[in-house]
Amino acid sequence: MKPAGFLCNIDSLGRIVIPAPVRKAYDLEKGDAIELFSDEDGIILKKYNPACIFCGGMDSISNFKGKVICESCIKKLSQIAGE
Ligand SMILES: [Zn+2]
């Protein structure tokens, strides 16, 4: 984890403002969901992307070991595994 070069203050409601250059660099727009990850070093913010990691689809998605996968790809993978 490397510093982004910005300091943000937490306001009285616990909010922070992500600086505009950082929002632009990570394609973050109003209404986007942010997922928080944490480890011993601190907190990492990532744009939440609920699309399937294989096909990019967003229908019938589920989570498997921290990765998003759609039902169609699950079926295709299980066919491969069954061969
Ligand atoms: Zn898929």
Image (cartoon, rainbow, N blue to C red):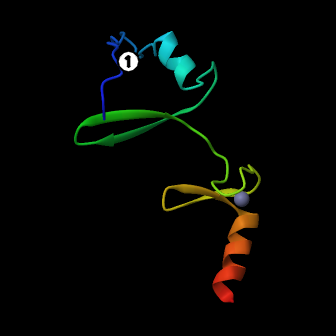
Query: Which residue of the protein is positioned furthest toward the left in this rendering?
Result: 40
Residue 3 found in image quarter: top left
Q: Secondary structure at mark 1?
A: loop
Residue 43 found in image quarter: top left
| Position in image of residue 36 (x %, y %) | 43, 37
Residue under the image location 63 percent in, 18 percent down = 30
| Position in image of residue 61 (x %, y %) | 68, 56
Answer few, some or many: residues within 10 Å of disc 1's Cα (few below 14, many 20 plus, some between 14 and 19): few
Q: Count of labels shown? A: 1
Q: Horizontal placement of 7 versus 32: left or right?
A: left
Query: Which residue of the protein is positioned furthest toward the bottom in this rendering?
Result: 83
Residue 75 found in image quarter: bottom right
- Residue underneath mark 1: 14
| Position in image of residue 29 (x %, y %) | 62, 20
Viewer-side residue, 76 vs 13: 76
Q: Is residue 43 above or below residue 65?
A: above
Residue under the image location 48 percent in, 18 percent down = 22
Q: Is residue 64 above or below residue 81?
A: above
Q: Horizontal placement of 6 versus 80: left or right?
A: left
Residue under the image location 75 percent in, 51 percent down = 57
Q: Quadrant of the C terminus?
A: bottom right
Give ligand 1's quarter of the image: bottom right
The answer to whether the beta carbon of the residue marked 1 is less than 8 Å from any atom of ligand 1 is no
Q: Is residue 29 above or below residue 62?
A: above
* Amino acid at the residue labelled 1: Gly
Q: Horizontal placement of 55 versus 25: left or right?
A: right
| Position in image of residue 79 (x %, y %) | 72, 81
Residue under the image location 33 percent in, 11 percent down = 9
Q: Is residue 42 above or below residue 23?
A: below
Q: Quadrant of the N terminus?
A: top left
Viewer-side residue, 82 vs 32: 82
